[in-house]
Amino acid sequence: DVTSGELIFELKREHTVRALAFSNNNTRLAAGGDDKTVALFDVASSDLRGRKECEHDVWAVKFSHDGHSLAVGDGSGRVALYTVPTPDGKFREKLSFKRTDAVRTVAFSPDGKLLAIGSEDHKVAVYEISTGHQLHEIERGDNVLRVAFLPKTGKTTLAVGGWDGILALYNTESGEQLQEIPRNSAVRDLSFS
């Protein structure tokens, strides 16, 4: 609890945790890492609600805005889109994508129609979820560490940051770069208020 400083949840894993994501209603926490698993926890009780074995280390996890899907990216370049586990704890894969290098970051558009994937191949790919069709591939100067969609703008704008120290905004309808903001160091995280 950030107000009281009280510990309300402690995630204990034997291996490095590389990716964490809360559902938008803050009731679930997904965690992935070097143990090649994704675990889903109930935040209120800290109970494990589901676990999925993966073939490679998990580097990225993100819930869709409606909380019904979970995107999981791994060190091999694979991203799987799962139906969030039902009470039986099973993850059901509904779609997957393959990149040429390790996936560092994933993000859903606010309307849930697009998925952006950033990877160590220096590219960001934007996919239409309903068809699995790649809409755009954006070439960057270095590994892509973070992608985030700008919420509630009427247009779909994607922010991209990475090792090259540049924060850039793109129109995902056209793939056109809208703005570039040079930084003094790598852009390791992105968030919009």
Image (cartoon, rainbow, N blue to C red):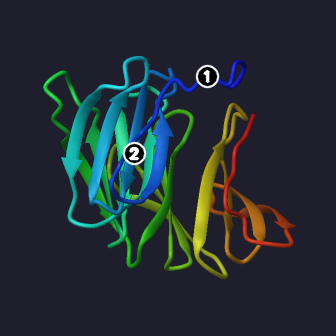
Q: Answer whether residue 143 is visible to the viewer in this image.
A: yes
Q: What residue lies at 38% left-to-right and 43% top-to-bottom? A: 12
Q: Position of residue 61 (x, y in %)?
A: 42, 49
* Count of marks, rendered view: 2
Examine the image and state in which quarter residue 110 appears.
top right
Mark nearer the viewer, 2 or 1: 1
The residue type indicated by label 1 comes to Glu
In this view, the residue in front, 131 or 82, is 82
- Asked if residue 9 is positioned above or below residue 188 in the image, the reply reads above
Mark 1 residue element: loop
| Residue 6, disc | 1
- Asked if residue 21 is positioned above or below residue 7 in the image, the reply reads below
The residue type indicated by label 2 comes to Ala
- Image-based side of 60 in relation to 72, left or right: right
Q: What residue lies at 25% left-to-right and 28% top-to-bottom? A: 49
Q: Position of residue 171 (x, y in %)?
A: 68, 54
Q: What residue lies at 18% left-to-right and 31% top-to-bottom? A: 89
- Image-based side of 12 in relation to 156, left or right: left
Dot 2, how many residues are within 10 Å of its Cα: few (below 14), some (14-19), or many (20+)?
many
- Label 2 – label 1 distance at C-alpha: 21 Å
Q: What residue lies at 61% left-to-right and 59% top-to-bottom? A: 146
Q: Mark 2 points at which residue?
A: 31
| Residue 61, disc | none
Screen quadrant of the C terminus: top right
In this view, the residue in front, 164 or 129, is 164
Give the mark nearest the N terminus, 2 or 1: 1
Examine the image and state in which quarter residue 67 appears.
top left
Screen quadrant of the N terminus: top right
Q: Position of residue 176 (x, y in %)?
A: 69, 63
Q: Answer whether residue 129 is visible to the viewer in this image.
A: no
In this view, the residue in front, 39 or 134, is 39
Q: Where is residue 33 in the image (x, y as percent from the top left)?
A: 37, 57
